[in-house]
Amino acid sequence: MRWLLTPAVLVVAVFAAALSALLRYSVLEFVPGSLVTGGLTVANFTGIMSRQYLGAVWDTVLLSAATTALTLVASYPVAYVLARSSARVRSALLVLTLAPFFTGAIVSCRSFVSSPAACLRCICLPSPLRRPKSPRPPIRPIAFCSSWTSRPPWRNTGTMN
């Protein structure tokens, strides 16, 4: 029975090793422009105590506490109904509870089935594959897919209009 704990112990050991390496580098002095670290120092920890970093930590603590409280308030009634209801109501409630986790995949699959060209435009394929059927200007890639600043990488001359 103890061998069932082996995977959990291995995962904890890997995370402990990673955290110990992080702690080791956190107490070493950073030398800009060098791959070699300096001697032992606590300046990294005193730098974290500045007002800017403490504000970010406080915001994170508040957000995580609010998220935890709202999750508990919303999940206990659902868990109570799941535990006390019949099998038919339980399965319907489970479907309603788990459906939001699948909506992203469902929307992506539906958009691909209905319009493969829209999916190809989203991944920013070169413009010769996106020729318009009418004399209107070619469709531009979606802005959040682009990684260029002034002109697309597949055009050698000119700029985007």
Image (spheres, rainbow, N blue to C red):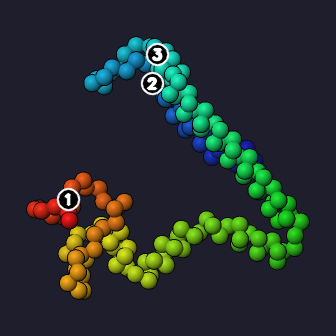
Instruction: Work out whether mark 2 precedes mark 3 in sequence or the reverse, and give the earlier one.
Output: 2
Please say if 65 is above or below 154.
above
Q: Nearer the viewer, residue 27 or 9?
A: 27
Does 29 appear above or below 112?
A: above
Asked if residue 13 is positioned above or below residue 104 in the image, the reply reads above
Please tell me whether mark 2 or mark 1 is closer to you in this view.
1
* Total number of numbered discs in the rendering: 3
Identity of the residue drawn at 51% across and 22% down: 50
2 or 3: mark nearer the eye: 3
Whether residue 73 is visible? yes
Residue 63 lies in quadrant: top right
Kind of residue sitting beneath label 2:
Tyr
- Residue occupied by mark 2: 25
The residue singled out by tag 3 in the image is 43
Q: Position of residue 126 (x, y in %)?
A: 23, 69
Task: Give the residue type that dot 1 points to.
Answer: Arg
Marks 2 and 3 sit apart, C-alpha to C-alpha, by 12 Å
Q: Where is residue 107 in the image (x, y as percent from the top left)?
A: 51, 73
Callout 3 amino acid: Ala
Give the residue furthest to the left. 157
Residue depicted at x 63% and y 36%: 61
Q: In this view, does 115 lie above or below 72?
A: below
Question: Label 2 crowding class (10 Å Cα cut-off): few <14, some 14-19, many 20+?
Answer: some
**Precedes in sequence: disc 2 or disc 1:** 2
Tell me what residue is drawn at x 27 percent, y 24 percent.
33
Could you tell me residue 92's position as x and y percent?
76, 75
Residue at the disc numbered 1: 151
